[in-house]
Image: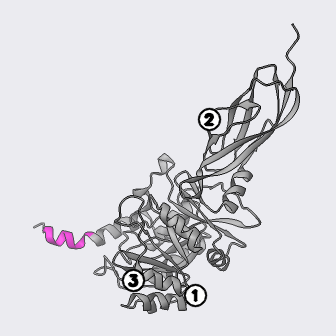
Amino acid sequence: MFCIKRFKCIMPLLTLLLIAAIFPTDALSQRGTRENIKIPDIRGYLTLKCDFHMHTVFSDGIVWPTVRVEEAWRDGLDVIAITDHLEGQKFRRDVPTQHDRAHEIAKPAAEASNIILIRGTEIARSLMHHNAIFTTDNESIFIDDFHESIQAAADQGAFIFYNHPGWRQAEGKSVWHEQQNEIFAKKSLHGIEVVNGRNYYPLSHQWCIDKKLTMLANSDVHNPLYFDYDASADEHRPMTLVFAKKRTAESVKDALFARRTAIWWKNYLIGDEQYLRPIFNETVEVITSELTITGNGGATLQVSNDSCVSYELEIGESEFVTAPKNVTLSAGRTVRIALKKKDVELFGKKKIRLPITVKNLYVLPNTGLEDEITFSLNFDKPAEK
């Protein structure tokens, strides 16, 4: 006789078995293809693609740890951290409570896939959740008192950041809790998730600037990743871009403490101007750098974008030519921008500086990067009648 109650009890285990069947551990490295993310290395640093917040069956996620490695490999990531909750384990009846076990299980698969795996955990108290990564012993961090738990992680040299600061708040709003003043004063708070999953928090972006905290973007994924992000629609998980001296865990840690990060979220790059400007300039090239306009005619400027981000430009006023106000430099493509000479008396060669705002490169909350496109124009005299 079919028993609904018994079926509900075994459902978590059946879910695990199904996922294991779909993603067999020993075949992970042989399945699928890897996304090549085109965001350049800059300023002598490697640009590493990272996700420092994700869950498995060892807390309230519904996948085995090796699945997180396979997803990361397919998504083009270089570095991940599995950060299961210390306080909550949804499948404790099926999976033993061992706070370092997910890392241990995932490590061989990460090494085989050339993914840097960082040990970490999530310290979750009420609405105030923090991740500690680069921990050495998660079991010893599981302490009832919040401040003692944070201090235990800090004593291990962990990098600690505030998770989803606008969780369960009105859209875009972030909350700074009183307890965070204490850990900030003790220098035990090092970063904030400016982006968590699908949510961007402008106020947290400003906090990072004002308080000199590191900006992060993470998926906080609990389901199989492709339940939440549609790969067929070119939808990607949010990522922290870490500018590291080497492709090592130690260099990643150094970069995080030095605040050398930016964020790739949807079609936005978010971060300090010193990192976003070189990314833009490294990937955008004027193909037709010298053009000719005859009389009061026009010319076509060709500009290429060698990145995976489509740049949304707002073009400002030029003294000599007009251009469309809004232009999209599509990812991996070359676009044409129509120019027309203004009604001015001008002959000969002239260097043109076309002021632009890259609207989806946020150097301040909801504020685009100011830059320019430069090229030369030859203004010929009109033919004599």
Please tell me the numbered disc located at residue 86. 3
Q: CA distance from mark 1 to mark 2?
A: 50 Å
Q: Which of marks 2 and 3 precedes in the sequence?
A: 3
For the C terminus, the image quarter is top right
Estimate the x, y position of residue 143 in percent, counting from the top left: 39, 91
Q: Nearer the viewer, mark 3 or mark 2?
A: 2
Residue name at image x 31 percent, y 81 percent = 92
Estimate the x, y position of residue 160 in percent, counting from the top left: 52, 80
Res 27 visible: no
For the N terminus, the image quarter is bottom left
Estimate the x, y position of residue 66 in percent, counting from the top left: 48, 71
| Depth check, front residue: 81 or 207 | 207
Q: Which residue is mark 1?
A: 157
Q: Nearer the viewer, mark 1 or mark 3?
A: 1
Q: Is residue 315 left or right of residue 60?
A: right
Residue name at image x 12 percent, y 69 percent = 3
Q: CA distance from mark 1 to mark 3?
A: 18 Å
Q: Which residue is mark 2?
A: 325
Query: In the image, what residue type sits under mark 2?
Result: Lys
Please provide the residue range marked out in magenta.
3-11
